Amino acid sequence: MSESTLREDICRYGRSLFERGLTPGSSGNISLRLDDGGWLVTPTNASLGFLDPARIARLDAAGTLLSGDKPTKEIPLHTALYESRTEARAIVHLHSTHSVAVSMLPEIDPRAVLPPMTPYYLMRTGGTALVPYYRPGDPAVADAIRGLAGRYGSVLLANHGPVVAGESLEGAVFATEELEETAKLYLLLRNLNPRYLSPAQVTDLVDHFGLTLPEHDHGHG
């Protein structure tokens, strides 16, 4: 796929996410890893709804800006997730309302932000970890991501928003959307004692679809 097509894809998905209210204002960022090890990444202070393909930042493998506008300040976040998830080719970071809300709840398990509510949550995200609050752009968040040792491709930053890696941009976007919808379900059903997927049902999904899930208790509902 050509670089120009990838730039158009970033703009198309960014506009879709913005228009559906999943990341307001100039929040959120998207990156794509290229075959030469470099990246395409959305600029700082840019709305995902109004991206210009020609102004998307092009970085080399060392993170040096080669062309386009200055990239998002969240580069350390993207770098750490690419380093720990070597199969990842795209990362989406949003400020989606329900995911942020869940990240602020006191009962959340950092090893399993959301319980196994639906099969597609597990199939798309593989489970989500919670990372403590860091100032946006703080390089220390990279160490927190690395501390997860690549077990999670879906991470929720406390009081901030989700960061999700995928083997394609489409995969990262779909996983981020699934995380947001599951967070919404969790908030709708909170304190109502809903039925979650049982450990046996989770195991069946793992066996049937070849899922790789982080080691934690899926049956804590």
Image (spheres, helix red, strand yellow):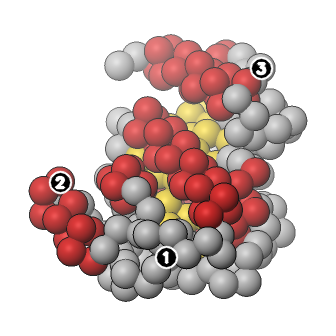
Residue pointed to by mark 3 = 50
Residue situated in front as seen by the camera: 198 or 35: 198
Pointer 2 or 1: first along the chain = 1
Residue lying farthest left? 208
* Visible residue check, residue 140: no
Instruction: Say which amino acid is labelled 3.
Output: Phe
Q: Horizontal placement of 80 versus 15: left or right?
A: left
Residue pointed to by mark 1 = 112
> How far separated are the C-alphas under marks 2 and 1?
20 Å
Q: Quadrant of residue 36?
A: top left
SS category of the residue bearing label 2 = helix
Q: Answer yes or no: do the residues labelled 3 and 1 have beta carbons within 8 Å?
A: no
Q: Horizontal placement of 199 versus 94: left or right?
A: left
Residue situated in front as seen by the camera: 49 or 71: 49
Q: Position of residue 187 (x, y in %)?
A: 67, 62
Pointer 3 or 1: first along the chain = 3
> How far separated are the C-alphas under marks 3 and 1?
34 Å
Classed neighbour count for the residue bearing mark 3: other residues with Cα under 10 Å, few (<14), some (14–19), many (≥20): few
Residue pointed to by mark 2 = 209
